[in-house]
């Protein structure tokens, strides 16, 4: 059972709706954040709310002042403390959306709507993804990388019919950037290599993993890995707020390393799990 926050209150599904005139329905105009709730606390709430604001700004959705972001922040905290929070608030996901609303004024969306959905963790990832997942490379690029858009259509189309591929990996011009919904890393010569901010979304988990890696003496190089380097990489992994660090064992037809999750991914996942408390409600 999910819980919804809309128009100033927490409500059941029967009491929430969007009009068909909202541009999120008609034109796919909308931005969002997926955040994890652990032990009734929201993981990295400040970073997520800052990115939501930047996504809205980047998309031309006029939220005006801090009111909307403040209300969503409050709703996330209150929702995670409620008795009816899914998963008892111990482990849940909250998705906060800002839609394009009903009005366009010279390319700006001036009457946005917003809402938050609290649910059980989605089974986005198959059971056993700790054994490693496969990615489907595509030469497509994700436009406007700093905007976390609701529109996943063109990314999802890349893996249509491919049961074994978890997500597409965007590789425009022969360089790997990020996947459909995760940041992407390779391990080359013991160093992490990941695309620099600006060429990809500012991943909250990406930043946490980079901080943990550096503190553990693992060097981090911020450049886009070349597709030709996949065959040389010892390891690869993806990161996102819901699942932390997920090993990648194959990209298209290329096995990564020995085709099994490697020690650097395992070490980073261990560090992530051991330290995640530091980022709760922060
Ligand atoms: C959500 C998302 C990520 C992961 O970001 P986190 O803040 O770590 O959850 C990375 N890339 C894209 C394209 C995304 O949509």
Image (cartoon, grey):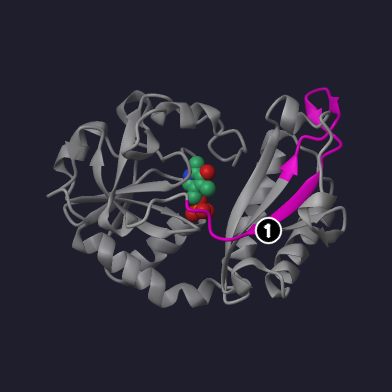
Q: Measured from the top left, where is residue 36 in percent x and y?
A: 56, 63
Image quarter (top left, top right, bottom left or bottom right) of the N terminus: bottom right
| Residue segment shown in magenta | 98-123
Tell which of 281 and 249 is nearer to you. 249
Q: Measured from the top left, where is residue 152 in percent x and y?
A: 55, 34
In this view, the residue farthest toward the left is 258
The residue located at (58%, 65%) in the rendering is 92
| Relative vertical location of residue 57 with respect to residue 9 in this rendering, above or below | above
Q: Measured from the top left, where is residue 271 in percent x and y?
A: 35, 72
Q: Name the residue under label 1.
A: 2
Left or right: where 240 falls relative to 109: left
Figure quadrant of residue 265: bottom left
Inspect the magenta stretch and tell me whether residue 121 lies in it: yes
Q: Does residue 29 appear in the picture of this structure? A: yes
The residue located at (40%, 72%) in the rendering is 273
Q: Measured from the top left, where is residue 233 in percent x and y?
A: 18, 45
């Amino acid at each position: 059972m999910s819980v919804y926050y809309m128009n100033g209150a927490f409500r059941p599904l029967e009491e929430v709706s969007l009009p068909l005139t909202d541009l999120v329905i008609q034109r796919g105009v909308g931005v969002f954040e997926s955040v994890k709730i652990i032990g009734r606390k929201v993981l990295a709430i400040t970073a997520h709310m800052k990115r939501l604001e930047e996504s809205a700004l980047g998309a031309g959705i006029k939220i005006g002042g801090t009111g909307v972001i403040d209300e969503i922040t409050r709703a996330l905290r209150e929702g995670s403390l409620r008795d009816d929070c899914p998963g008892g608030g111990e482990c849940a996901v909250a998705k906060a959306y800002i839609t394009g609303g009903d009005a366009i004024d010279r390319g700006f969306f001036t009457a946005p709507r917003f809402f938050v959905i609290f649910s059980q963790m989605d089974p986005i990832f198959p059971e056993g993804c700790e054994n490693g997942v496969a990615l489907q490379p595509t030469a497509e690029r994700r436009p406007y990388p700093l905007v976390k858009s609701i529109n996943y259509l063109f990314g999802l189309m890349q893996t249509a019919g491919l049961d074994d591929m978890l997500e597409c990996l965007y590789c425009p011009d022969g360089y790997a950037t990020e996947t459909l919904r995760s940041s992407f890393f390779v391990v080359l010569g013991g160093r992490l290599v990941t695309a620099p901010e600006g060429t990809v979304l500012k991943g909250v988990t990406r930043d946490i993993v980079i901080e943990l890696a550096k503190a553990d003496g693992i060097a981090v190089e911020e450049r886009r890995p070349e597709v030709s380097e996949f065959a040389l990489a010892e390891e690869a992994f993806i990161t996102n707020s819901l699942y932390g660090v997920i090993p990648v064992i194959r990209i298209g037809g290329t096995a990564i390393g020995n085709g099994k999750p490697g020690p650097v991914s395992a070490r980073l996942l261990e560090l992530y799990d051991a330290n995640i408390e530091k980022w709760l409600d922060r």
